[in-house]
Amino acid sequence: MGAERARRQQGERQPRTVILQASHVRADAEVHRHIGLNDALHLADLHDILGTTFGFCEAPGPTPWHFSRADDRDARLDAADPIHRHLAVEGDRICYHFGLWDVTLSAVESYPRDDGTPRALCVGGSGAFGGREFDLAGINAALTGTTTIRSVLEVTEPAVRDIITRSGIFDFVPLLQALDLLRGGGLPRGTVELLRRLPVEEDPAGRDAFWTVVLALACMGNEALGNQILETTMSALGWEDDDGTPLTGARVRELCVESLTLLADVGGYGSHARSPVDRLEIYRELLRDAPPREHAAE
């Protein structure tokens, strides 16, 4: 009876989206990926997804691989197991082994999914193997096969839509899609009200800088990746420093320092930022379309 009940409960279970942090750290290389995926997929599917996001799928010839418990690489996990059996709640960890590479997988967040949510998307990351650049758009094109730019942008904050259109950097679309902007939030009312007032800068450069910083933060990458996003995006928007040189990441942040100070007050930025799960909730609230924001002058 117990086994039958377990099977029935398994059949009734609704798939969820789980956000995974996948990290390969060695002396000669450090590569990180944040991946959102359907937790009803199997570990064998996760193997394919990791192959795409890390570039392992380009390795020549067959390469041995397996999943294991985080504390024992010889304690192999069944590739037919559903992902949620091992990575369901924040803090769950397992390891993936592909040839000589080891990747630690940690569950960061889990939430309900709907029919329109992609099977798997790379939310952000840093580093790459073989001297290549981290190509978020290329990874997600390989994962999804097609893009849904229009539907994603329709539910995105208009100022962010404008930045993506003006800059021509549509690499942000898979990120916004993975964030599931329509998902209801659980932030305190006071926090939401503060976020609705951002940015407080009145000048166009400062406002562009703020939204660019928020997009970079939502990628959940390291400082180097953040600087690259800020510098590339602001340059594509046509902004430069007072002396005509390209804006650095630090200068971009200076342009919207008042808004970033307020964002830090609610844990979305800075040395005392909240957990990754809580920060994603803050960025989701900022980036989704909502009632008109208050302008600083009003």
Image (cartoon, helix red, strand yellow):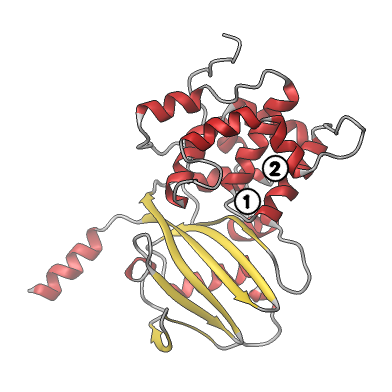
Percent coordinates x, y for residue 94 in the rendering: 42, 75
Q: Residue at x 51, y 40 (%)?
A: 268
Measured Cα–Cα span from mark 1 to mark 2: 13 Å
Q: Mark 1 = which residue?
A: 146
Residue appearing at x 72%, y 19% in the figure: 203
The residue that appears at 62% across and 58% down in the rendered structure is 125
From the viewer's perspective, is 265 left or right of 226? Answer: left
Depth order, front residue of 92/150: 92
Mark 1, other Cα within 10 Å: few <14 / some 14–19 / many ≥20: few
Tell me the quarter of the picture where residue 141 sits.
bottom right
Mark before the other along the chain sequence, 1 or 2: 1
Locate residue 28, reporting x and y percent: 70, 78
Q: Closer to the camera: disc 1 or disc 2?
A: 2
Q: Is residue 59 visible in this depiction of the protein? A: yes
Q: Position of residue 170 (x, y in %)?
A: 70, 42
Is residue 260 left or right of 75 when viewed as pictured?
right
Image position of 298 (left or right of 208):
left
Q: Amino acid at mark 2?
A: Phe
Kindly identify which residue carries mark 2: 170
